[in-house]
Amino acid sequence: MTRLLVFSRTTGYRHESIEEGVAALRDLAAEASVDLDHTESGDAFTSANLRRYAAVVWLQSSGTGLLDADQRQAYEEFTAEGGGYAGVHLASAAEQDWPLYDRLVGARFTSHPRELQTARIQAERTDDPATKPLPTPWSWHDEWYAFDTNPRGTVEVLATVNEDDYDVGSSGMGPDHPICWRTQVGRAKAWYTSLGHAPVAYEDETFRAHLWGGVTSVLR
């Protein structure tokens, strides 16, 4: 049976929605007959243990020092063998001193507006598992992340947000503002969504379909 590891350790900011995210992923995995393990310990990152998994979901992981050098090496071996990466929301702020993680996540969180706001999301790939369930456009209430770079050109952008719909403050990226994408790093498939700040998001059926579609798209 396919097995998934959810990793939600934080050494930086910790989102209140982690518990809801884990619960949602457990429900979705059970519905799909996928085994799921959840950990907040780097001890799960050994070569022998990671071989059991088809992918690792970095759920709101943040800060540096989440994994030590040996654990990072085991994870690098895992991705080299085709193990998948899925990153959710603040996972784009995890392990910022790790080049492999830079490549997997695609871009780094820098800032967001002060308030959660509603804006329209436009899917660019309506045939992708993560965006196929979304209305076009999709009006969604969330925390809109800005990134250190526009990843378009190094990743395949799956969806963007319309900045005309909300007060970007100093956290704008202009008319092309990706919020979800996928890429390939060697044999590893990688997917990231910047959505999922609030606990209530993980109760929403459309968001859950988006999340699970992205996760399943990277399974080896």
Image (cartoon, rainbow, N blue to C red):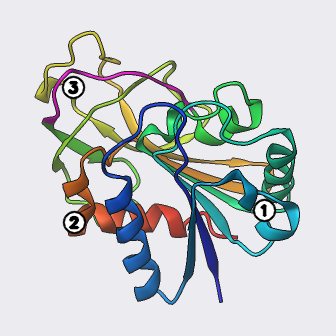
Q: Main secondary structure of the magenta part?
A: loop
Q: Residues within 10 Å of mark 3 (few under 14, many from 20)?
A: some
User: Can you tell which mark lies on residue 163?
Assistant: 3
Q: Are marks 1 and 2 in contact (CB under 8 Å)?
A: no
Of 100 and 40, the residue lying toward us: 40
Q: Residues within 10 Å of mark 1 (few under 14, many from 20)?
A: many
**Left or right, residue 24 beside residue 129:** left
Measured as percent of width and height from the top left, residue 13 is found at 42, 32
Q: Are marks 3 and 2 in contact (CB under 8 Å)?
A: no
Q: Give the Cα separation between the discs numbered 1 and 2.
A: 31 Å
Asked whether residue 129 is in view, the answer is: no
Of 167 and 114, the residue lying toward us: 114
Of the residues shown, which amino acid type is indicated by label 3? Glu
What is the count of numbered marks? 3
Q: Give the Cα separation between the discs numbered 1 and 3.
A: 36 Å
Element carrying mark 2: helix
Which residue corresponds to mark 2? 203
Measured as percent of width and height from the top left, residue 199 is found at 24, 54
Which residue corresponds to mark 1? 82
Element carrying mark 1: loop
**Left or right, residue 136 beside residue 173:** left
- Residue 79 sits inside the magenta stretch: no
Of the residues shown, which amino acid type is indicated by label 2? Glu
Q: Which residues are magenta?
A: 107-117
